[in-house]
Structures are given as structure tokens and as C-alpha cells.
Amino acid sequence: MKESEAVRSRELQRLRWRSRRGLLELDIVLGRFWAECGEELDDSDAGGLAKLLAMPDNDLLDLVMGRRDCPDPALQPLLQRLKAA
Amino acid sequence: MALAVRKFDAVIVGAGGSGLRAALELSNAGLKVAVLSKVFPTRSHTVAAQGGVGAALGNMGEDSWHWHMYDTIKGSDWLGDQDAIEFMCRMAPEVVIELEHFGMPFDRNDDGTIYQRPFGGHSQNFGERPVQRSCCAADRTGHAMLHTLYQRNVLARTQFFVEWMALDLVRGADGTVLGVTALEMETGETVLFQGKATLFATGGAGRIFSSSTNAFINTGDGLGMAARAGIPLQDLEFWQFHPTGVAGAGVLITEGVRGEGGILLNRNGERFMERYAPTMKDLASRDVVSRAMATEIKEGRGAGEHADHILLKLDHLGPEVIDKRLPGIREIALKFANVDCARDPIPVVPTAHYQMGGIPTNYRGEVVVPAGGSSASVVPGLYAAGECGCASIHGANRLGTNSLTDLLVMGKSAGMSMAEYIRAQGGAHPALPAGAGDEALARLARLDGQKGGEDVSAIRDEIQRTMQAHCGVFRFPDLLVQGVAKIRALGDRLARTEIKDKSKVFNTARVEALELENLYEVARATMVSAEARKETRGAHDREDFHARDDASWLKHTLWYREGDRLAYKPVNLKPLTVDSIEPKARVY
Ligand SMILES: Cc1cc2nc3c(=O)[nH]c(=O)nc-3n(C[C@H](O)[C@H](O)[C@H](O)COP(=O)(O)OP(=O)(O)OC[C@H]3O[C@@H](n4cnc5c(N)ncnc54)[C@H](O)[C@@H]3O)c2cc1C
């Protein structure tokens, strides 16, 4: 494994753990997301996911359930995949 | 191999409401405090609490801590210890006002006082009429509580160790607790956190059931660590269930759905509640509905391929009514049950919600065990608070909003007791015994070296299915006996779990394997304690002994891991200052 790949895989492992949340609903949605899309995440996805996962649980759930619009348009495509999972 | 040691006055495991409240007390007292958490503090499960925190402030009409105490004792079906309950209800107004001063954004009345909501089970004048006692911050009470307490802790210089998992207690030769071993997820390193006092505030273990409202982190780690260290677990047969969680997911479907006309059907399409509660039907009380659902499933009339759930039908209400009166329900049903409830019924099952039992403590938060002729001898150096502790305030059933009260009161109380104990010890930390931390290292080495072993998620599924089917909301004697055998048999498989990924950095598989060892202890304690208690009390509801039996069972269960042994200790019916509230029938 090249060094950059190792760094990326470490970052993804970290994000996988940070997908453990305080709200059950998010655990379920993020669990499905990793099962469906985990293999194909690239660096830019990882950056976006890190931003989403840094949000408070209630705010993230509002986005996932479509109760609120995403404040950052750049995150929209990733959020769509999360919502579809 | 000698472990790296980090020394603190206090070591706190858990950064939910209870851990943060205790930490604040200690840091404000000028002590050096470490708080360990598997997840970022504000992502602890406390964030899920919406209903509010109960305290007799009397802002909406007359109220008193004594009435709150009566409601709590009655709710507990007289299994709660009355000294601890008096303590909590008296302290509740003080800790809520304190939280307000810390910056908690409570909802307010026009006169500026904290607004209070009504909540089931809370009454005026010893059960006469409902009272509004629940203080909330919109529907984000838990979230606001975590943020407020976390900010205060940062100011008070509490040291946080985030994404660290505590593994095992470290005890001295005389049994004194000296700290914990913990794994840093980022590096995979194990470190010994030595403290003059150690607090478990690790939350509940709702994940022992396949249908649970609890987040995935709620694996009962504090209980597992205590059990492995020879400390008994108390009253674990008592779990609060909610009648309607989405089958297979656990996400709650509000009781408002039945209030608006939703009905429950079995696999034959029969509206079975007509048989169990001819008058109230689907609007009967929670326990009647849950019991009927469990009976239908047990008798083979459950819906679905495995005949393991009930159908909640609401399409007859029409999409307009559903959208208007039950906002958000369609989205929840679609996302978590994959059905459009305007067309098809939602699959539901009674779902585990709150753990009344836990690590036995007194109202000072000190862990107590039977020893030397006393049923409650203090384990020096060890404290527990929040959902993982059992003081016992909630006894056989918890009133809504009393858990957040418990977090604040017992968190603060444990913090105060710890500060006292730490000061009494003076300067240096005691020497660690040779081999301190070996238990955890041995468990890690076993896991890393295992070949041809068992799959972690397969065992977890098996535990959860067994608990749900054999020890659910309504308990049948034959199923309990089989359940004990099944859970015991899983012990051998648990000892052989294997992880394929042995990497060091953020190895979620390793963490999950370690969590499973804790989850198993709680499941086993629950099943064995439930099988043994031959009565119905609060949330422990048995088909064969369908009444409370104070003559034989007005006592707390203590389960010991060693040999699956059970012992019992008396309930404390004596409050601190007022007269005892004598047991009587619990009717609402
Ligand atoms: C959906 C829902 C709604 C609820 N609503 C209400 C309500 O309105 N009112 C009410 O009173 N109660 C409510 N409850 C119950 C209440 O929220 C919980 O009982 C309470 O929040 C538990 O808080 P805690 O501090 O004990 O633990 P938690 O908030 O669960 O925190 C546990 C902490 O321990 C840490 N931890 C665990 N194991 C380890 C380990 N091995 N190493 C390091 N750290 C560890 C975790 O990271 C976390 O920080 C609700 C519960 C649910 C599920």
C-alpha cells in the first residue's frame, strides 16, 4: 500500500467510527451508507463526510430526513447518497 | 509489558449527562479530572432525550418534592429505595436551576420562569391530579444539556480523552479501585488511567435487545467492566419497553398514531386488541397493549416471514389526516420500515427503551456490595451514576423525565463524594500492584491471536434475538428457562470471537468485539435475574406469576458473573426525613 493510500484508509476508518452517533436513526442510515457506498468513497467524499459528521446529531438528522435544506451546496451530492441509503 | 500510566485525581468513564455533571463538580473543586468517551461528548446518547427533565419547581401551579417523591416510588412499584428517591426529588429543583445558570436554554413562561410540560405519572397531592413538572428546551433537551455541560467543563479545564474506550477496572490487592485500562482508538495503544477515584457513567445497554430505541454505542461497557471485576449487577430484569418501535430498526412510532385512530393487526388481519381490552381497544395503557402484542407473537399470530411482529394500520385515516395530525410519520415509516403508511401498515414490536437496573450504589454514588455482614458495603474508589448506576431510584419502572433528573442529581452527588474521598487521601497516588492492567491486555491478546473463531456480528445478532424472543416485554416461564440455556451456551462462542482486521488505527471491528463482551454480561444478568423473579412488578411482567408478591419479592436482585450466582438485598423503605410510603396497589 502506498503511503497516500494508507493515510486515506486511516481517514476512512476514522470516519467509519465517527458514524457511531447519539441518535439511533443516524446509526441506521450511516450503517446502510457504509454498506452500500463504503468501498467507493474517494478523497473528496471523505472530506464532505467529515463535515457532515462534525454536525450536531439533531441537525444532521434534519438534513437526512429532508426537514431542512443543506447549508453548504457542495455537500449536496453526498447528502443525496446518504438520504438514498 | 508495563503499561504507560497517566495519573489524575478523578477518572470518569462516560461523557453523557451524568459523566459531564460529575466532572464539572470535580473540576470546579480544583481537582485534576480525566473524562474518557468512546464518542465526542455531545454525541453521547443523552442527545436523544426530548421529553424533558422533571423537577418540582411549581412554576405552573403548586408542586412539591414530596409529591414528586410519591410519584417516583409508585412508578417504581415500590422497588425503589426511598432514601435515594427522597434525595433525588429534593435536589431536583436545585440542580435544574443550577443548569439554568450554567446557560441551559430552557423554554420559558411569560414571567421569565422555566416553562414546565405535563408528563405521564407526575401528579399533585399524592396522585390526585396531573401536574406540569417537566422542564425542556424545545424538543432538544438532551442536546442542550450536553452542550451546556460540555462548555462549562471546557471552562473548568476538565481533560477530555475522546475516542478512548475503557476496557477494565484496575483494583488493588485489598479491592480498592485504582482506575481503568483504556484503548486509544486512533493509535490502538492501551494506557492505564490511574485515579484516586473512578466513576462509571457509561449509560444503558439497550442494545442487548434486537428491537431497541438506543443508539449503537449503548453496549453496557460499565456493567461489563464491573461484572468482570467481581461486582454484582442489580435489578437487571427491569427494562422499560415502548409498545411501538419499527420492527427490526427500533425507531419509535409515537403513541399518537393510535390516538389518531391507528389500529394493531395480527397476521390474520384481526384487530386483536378487541379481545384483550374490549372497551379501550388500541388505546389501552402501554403495558396492556405491549402484553397483547407479545402474546399474539408468542402464539404464532405475528406477521411477516418469521411471524415476529405486529402491523400498525393507519391507511384508513387517509393521507391528509396522516400528514396533518401525525407530521413526520410518513417519512419515518418510509425510511425505517420501507413502507408508505398511507397505503400499507407499519411493522412494529415492543421495543426496549430504558434500563432500570445497573451497578449498585447508594445515593452518594458510591458503589456498594454485600460484604462483612452488610448488604451495602462501599467499594473504595468506585462510583457509578446515570443509566449505568442503580441507586435505586427507578426501582421496577422509571417515570418519564426522571432519567435526566437522575443524571444531574446523581452526577453531582457522585462528584461531591469523590471530591471528599480524593481530599481524604492526600498527596501521592498509591502504588499499582504488579500486573495491573493484565486482564485487559490478556483479552486483547486473545482477540488478536484467535484463529478459526466466531464472527462478532453473528453472536451479537444471536444475543439480541434471544433476548427479544425469550425475555421481552411479557415473559413466559418456558421461554425464560430456554432463554437461560441459550444465553449460557453463547458464552463458549463469545470466548472465541475472531476479527479479520488486526490493524491498529480506528479498528472498529476490534472495538465492536470488545463491546460485545460487555453486552453479553448484561444480557446474561438480565435473563438469569428475570427467570428467577417469580412475580410481576413494574416492567417485569410474567405470564405465570401475574401479580406483585411483596411477601417474597420486595427485594433487589444481585447477579454475580462468577457462577451466574444470584443474591438478594432488602429494599430501603425508609426515606431520609419523611414517613415511609408504604406499598399499595399501583393503579393509575
Ligand atoms: C429516544 C430516547 C428519548 C429519551 N427521552 C428522555 C427524556 O425526555 N427524559 C428523560 O429523563 N430521559 C429520557 N431518556 C433516557 C435518557 O436519555 C438516558 O437514560 C440518559 O441520557 C443516559 O445518560 P447517561 O449519562 O447515563 O449516559 P449516556 O448519555 O448514554 O452516555 C454514556 C457515555 O459513556 C461513554 N462510554 C460508554 N462506554 C464507554 C467506554 N467503554 N469507554 C469510554 N466511554 C464510554 C459514551 O461515549 C458516552 O459518552 C430517553 C432515552 C431515549 C433512548
Image: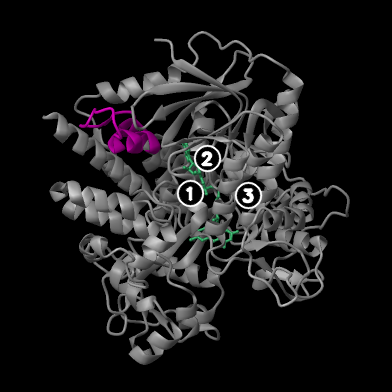
Confirm if mark 3 falls within 8 A of ligand 1. Answer: yes
Q: Which residue is mark 3?
A: B407
Q: Is residue B114 above or below residue B327?
A: above
* Left-right relation of A61 to B230: left
Q: Of the residues under marks 1 and 2, which one precedes in the sequence?
A: 2
Crowdedness near tag 2: few (<14), some (14–19) or many (≥20) residues, C-alpha within 10 Å: many
Circle 3 sits in a helix, a strand or a loop, which is it? helix
**CB within 8 Å, label 1 to label 2:** yes
Three-letter residue code for mark 3: Leu
Mark 3 vs mark 2, CA separation in Å: 12 Å
Residue B358 appears in view: no
**Residue at 45% of width from left, 80% of height from top?**
B257
Residue at image mark 2? B14
Residue at the far top in the pictured view: B434
Q: Which mark is residue B44?
A: 1
Q: Is mark 2 within 8 Å of ligand 1?
A: yes
Check the residue under mark 3 and report the chain it is in. B
Which portion, as a residue range, is magenta? B490-515
